[in-house]
Image (cartoon, rainbow, N blue to C red):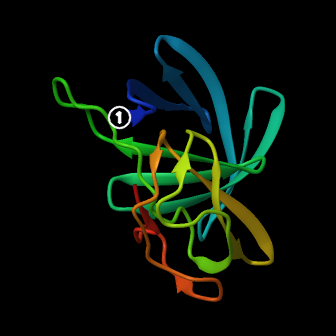
Amino acid sequence: MEFSYCYRDREYTVNVDKEEGVLKVALNGREYPVKVMLFNQGFLQFSVGDRNCRCTVGVEGPQRHIFYKGKVYRITEGKLKAGQKEEGSLTSPISGKIVKLLVEEGQEVKKGAPIMILEAMKMEHTVKAPKDGVIKKIFFKPGDQVDIGVQLVDM
C-alpha cells in the first residue's frame, strides 16, 4: 500500500507491506520494521526495530496530528500540487481548554514563538507561531473550550 504525506512543505512517499505480523514501512527509500502493539481510540503503541514508542493521533479530514514526546507533528495526506506549500496555520491541534494567552492582537511574532497554552486531559500544549507575522485576531479567551481543527488566531 502506498501513501503520500506532506510535512513542512515536503512530500513523503510511504510504502507499507505486511509480512509475518510486522509492517515493513519504507519512507523515501529507507525501510523500517514496525510492529503495532495497540491502536485504540487515537492511542498508538508500536515498536520500530527494538525501540518502543507511544503516541496519540488525532484525525481531522486529510490532516493527522501526531503527539509524540511533547511535540505535535501535523501531516497532511495527499500530494502537494505544483508550486503549493502548506501555509502556517494556527488551528487547534487538539480539543481542549484555552488556559492562557501569551500574545495580544497587533503583536509581531517570530516563527516558533509561543501563542497560547491549551489543556487537554490534564496535559498542557503550547501553540506556537508557524511563521513570522502579526497577530491580527484572537478568536478565543482563557477558559474557552475548543475543538480540534478550529482556527485559534488569524495572522
Q: Is residue 141 left or right of residue 154?
A: right
Against 90, residue 35 (above or below) is: above
- Residue 86 placement (x, y as % from top left): 33, 38
The type of residue carrying mark 1 is Phe
Residue 1 visible within the image? no
- Residue 152 placement (x, y as % from top left): 46, 69
The residue at 56%/39% (across/down) is 111
Near mark 1 (Cα within 10 A), the count class, few <14, some 14-19 or many ≥20, is: few
SS at mark 1 in the image: strand
The residue at 76%/67% (across/down) is 124
Residue nearest the viewer, comparing 68 with 29: 68
- Residue 61 placement (x, y as % from top left): 33, 61
The residue at 59%/51% (across/down) is 66
Against 61, residue 121 (above or below) is: below
Q: In this view, does 99 lie to the left or right of 61?
A: right
Residue nearest the viewer, comparing 71 with 64: 71
Residue, far front: 106
Residue 122 visible within the image? yes
Residue nearest the viewer, comparing 113 with 61: 113
- Residue 35 placement (x, y as % from top left): 68, 39
Residue nearest the viewer, comparing 135 with 122: 135
Residue, far left: 82
Against 89, residue 112 (above or below) is: above
Which residue lies under the disc numbered 1?
A: 3
The C terminus lies in which quarter of the figure?
bottom left
The N terminus lies in which quarter of the figure?
top left
